[in-house]
């Protein structure tokens, strides 16, 4: 396995509250996928599925690969990740498009499911336990397990958003986390040590807060920034590329990724990356944290 990315070897962006959505002018988010390639297109592409990771590129997220859910109106979803025995077992990740007037008053059928909602386009109104929040691109919400919530598109253009779900694992002596709404613009990226500002992480939850058993962060690399070693750890990952391009090491292979692509990693899959291009390389990152390893059969 080479830790030198291809680009280095051959060089190649109710009460109502409103969170700020005016993210830095340097930050962008991909628009909605869909459509269908012409008959002249080649089926060969960048999609990969192995027993350690999957790459689901933007160009395979087409109209005919969407799903619909009971209780949701004018809403379609690309299911990018779901619990799978022997692969990644802790979370699901939906990329969602909700058109004008669409949404749900009964969005979740599992009382044990907590959620992160992150908006990348359009506008939504999220109501959690009676408190309404207006959401636009860059706004981030945490919905605790068991909360009463609803979500509806409020604009004339489709809302595009991410819905990341995990079964909440209670811990003795630790209270359950509270709902909150913030934004990409309101949370400051924290530089990683010894990286000269090239690698930073926007953390929406304090890592020392034991109430939370999942983190969904935004990781940002400036051009040329990198993870300088092969991370190999127990946390599962879902990575949705928000902006820019990069070379990503997955197990023993380097793959080129760009905005709109999704990477899905099981526990202990080695990973590293290098930002390519002239704009920041940013991704939305899920990981499971802060709980004992389950010892029951199947790890569930």
Image: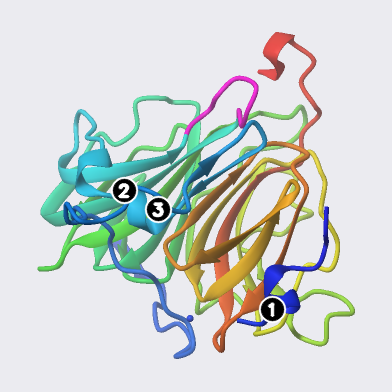
- Chain part drawn in magenta: 82-89
Above or below for 182 versus 265: below
Residue at image coords 61%, 32%: 88
CA gap between label 3 and label 1 equals 34 Å
Which sits earlier in the primary sequence, circle 1 or circle 2? Answer: 1
Tell me where residue 107 appears, x and y as whole percent: 29, 36
Q: For residue 84: magenta?
A: yes
Residue 294 falls left or right of residue 241: right
Residue at image coords 46%, 62%: 140
Q: For residue 41: magenta?
A: no
Reading the image, the residue beneath label 2 is 130
Residue at image coords 56%, 89%: 278
Instruction: Tell me whether the residue at label 3 lies in contact with that at label 1, contact meaning CB atoms closer than 8 angstroms.
Output: no
Tell me where residue 298 appears, x and y as whole percent: 69, 13
Main SS category, magenta section: loop
Above or below for 172 versus 296: below
Q: Is residue 190 visible?
A: no
* Residue 157 quadrant: bottom left
Tell me where residue 268 appears, x and y as whole percent: 78, 39
Q: Secondary structure at mark 3?
A: strand
Tell me where residue 154 appears, x and y as whole percent: 16, 63
CA gap between label 3 and label 2 equals 22 Å
Reading the image, the residue beneath label 1 is 10
Please rate how many residues cluster around mark 1, counting C-alpha atoms within 10 Å: few if below 14, some from 14 to 19, many from 20.
few
Residue 113 falls left or right of residue 53: left
Q: Residue 162: which numbered mark, if any?
A: 3
Residue at image coords 24%, 32%: 69
């Amino acid at each position: 396995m080479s830790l030198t990315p291809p680009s280095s070897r051959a060089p190649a962006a109710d009460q109502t509250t409103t969170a700020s959505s005016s993210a830095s002018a340097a930050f962008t988010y991909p628009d909605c996928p869909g459509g269908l390639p012409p008959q002249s297109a080649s089926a060969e592409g960048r999609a990969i599925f192995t027993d350690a990771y999957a790459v689901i590129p933007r160009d395979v997220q087409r109209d005919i690969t969407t799903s619909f859910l009971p209780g949701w109106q004018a809403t379609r979803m690309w299911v990018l990740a779901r619990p799978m025995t022997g692969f990644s077992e802790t979370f699901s990740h939906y990329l969602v498009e909700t058109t004008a007037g669409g949404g749900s008053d009964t969005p979740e059928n599992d009382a044990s499911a907590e959620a992160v909602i992150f908006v990348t386009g359009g506008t939504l109104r999220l109501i959690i336990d009676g408190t309404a929040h207006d959401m636009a691109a860059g706004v981030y919400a945490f919905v605790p397990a068991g909360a009463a919530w609803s979500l509806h598109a409020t604009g004339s253009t489709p809302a595009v958003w991410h819905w990341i779900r995990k079964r909440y694992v209670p811990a003795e002596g630790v209270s359950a986390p509270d709902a909150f709404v913030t934004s990409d613009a309101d949370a400051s990226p924290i530089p990683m040590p010894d990286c000269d500002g090239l690698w930073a992480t926007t953390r929406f939850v304090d890592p020392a807060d034991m109430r939370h058993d999942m983190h969904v962060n935004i990781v940002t690399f400036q051009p040329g920034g990198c993870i300088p070693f092969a991370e190999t750890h127990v946390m599962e990952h879902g990575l949705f590329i928000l902006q820019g391009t990069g070379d990503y090491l997955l197990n023993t292979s380097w793959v080129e990724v760009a905005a709109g692509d999704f990477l899905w990693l099981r526990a202990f899959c080695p990973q590293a990356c290098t930002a390519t291009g002239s704009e920041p390389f940013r991704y939305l990152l899920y990981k499971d944290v802060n709980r004992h390893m389950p010892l029951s059969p199947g790890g569930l």
